[in-house]
Image (cartoon, rainbow, N blue to C red):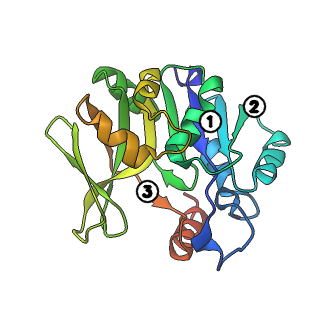
Amino acid sequence: MLEEIDVVILCGGLGKRLRTVDESTPKVMMAFEDRPFLDIVIERMADQGFQRFVLCTGYKADWVENYYRNYETDVIIDFSREEEPLGTGGAVMNARPIVDSDPFIVLNGDCYCEVDYQKFVDYHHQVEATASIVAAEVPDSKDYGSLVMDDDSRILQFLEKQDKGGQFINAGRYCFSQDVFDVMPDTPKFSMEYDVFPALIEEGLYGFKTQGEFFDIGTPERYQKAMEFFQHGK
């Protein structure tokens, strides 16, 4: 049941490429019709049944935390603060003491992807994975690294950005068993993408394919695309 599964959201990004749009606002707090983008992410997860969220804060942590301490919602929101940038993997490890469920969901707070999370979690159990990644199919992959998978959707390789048209990419949504902490580096700062996932390929790292809408808000152009998507009532 999804209400028993913790959702860890990475919220510490600097958002440097968005500073031409807004030079001071943390990326996950960028405005979408007078409310933060992160509101939309949390609400859509809650609509599927998730009840507890752990926000990994970093850049302008007080801004994010103060907003969500006063956020009127029925879900539980806790915080794991980075006193210095720890990378995507370091942020998850820093949150380990307050992540209770097994498995748990991790996602990048500056992305949106339409996923049936119950099916995603069921798939994670089915393949008995330590880690599963949502693999979003995009029509133009030149701005993203792509995934090489076999016929069983086992991930064999991560490719750097290539202009190869439609591909499956890492959508920044993960389902982790608690065992994932055992393969994380013994260092405070590290990357999930570069330091953990490659090490998991031999053990079994799987992609959950989806053709649902995917975008991130990391650049002014992508931010505008996201604005248009939600303005059309999606």
| Residue assigned mark 1 | 46
Which one is earlier in the sequence, the residue at label 2 or at label 3? 2
Which one is earlier in the sequence, the residue at label 2 or at label 1? 1
- In the image, what residue type sits under mark 2? Asp
Residue 186, placed above or below residue 1: below
| Residue assigned mark 3 | 214
Q: Quadrant of residue 217?
A: bottom right
Residue 6, placed above or below residue 220: above
On screen, residue 82 versus residue 204, left or right, reads right
On screen, residue 133 versus residue 67, left or right, reads left
| Residue assigned mark 2 | 74
- In the image, what residue type sits under mark 3? Phe
Please state the horizontal and vertical placement of residue 146, each as a whole percent of the image: 28, 56
Please state the horizontal and vertical placement of residue 105, each as a whole percent of the image: 50, 33
Between marks 2 and 3, how big is the CA–CA gap?
27 Å
Q: Nearer the viewer, residue 129 or 213?
A: 129
Of helix, strand and loop, which one carries label 1?
helix
Badge 2 vs badge 3, beta-carbon distance below 8 Å = no
Please state the horizontal and vertical placement of residue 88, each as a whole percent of the image: 52, 46
Query: Considering the image in quadrants, where does the C terminus appear?
Result: bottom right
Label 3 crowd (10 A; few <14 / some 14-19 / many >=20):
some
Please state the horizontal and vertical placement of residue 145, each as a whole percent of the image: 32, 59
Between marks 2 and 1, how big is the CA–CA gap?
9 Å
Label 2 crowd (10 A; few <14 / some 14-19 / many >=20):
few
The single residue placed furthest to the left in the displayed view is 151
The single residue placed furthest to the bottom in the displayed view is 20
Of helix, strand and loop, which one carries label 3?
strand
Badge 2 vs badge 1, beta-carbon distance below 8 Å = yes
Q: Nearer the viewer, residue 213 or 38?
A: 38
Between marks 3 and 1, how big is the CA–CA gap?
18 Å
- The residue at the point 56 percent across, 39 percent down is 188
Of helix, strand and loop, which one carries label 2?
loop
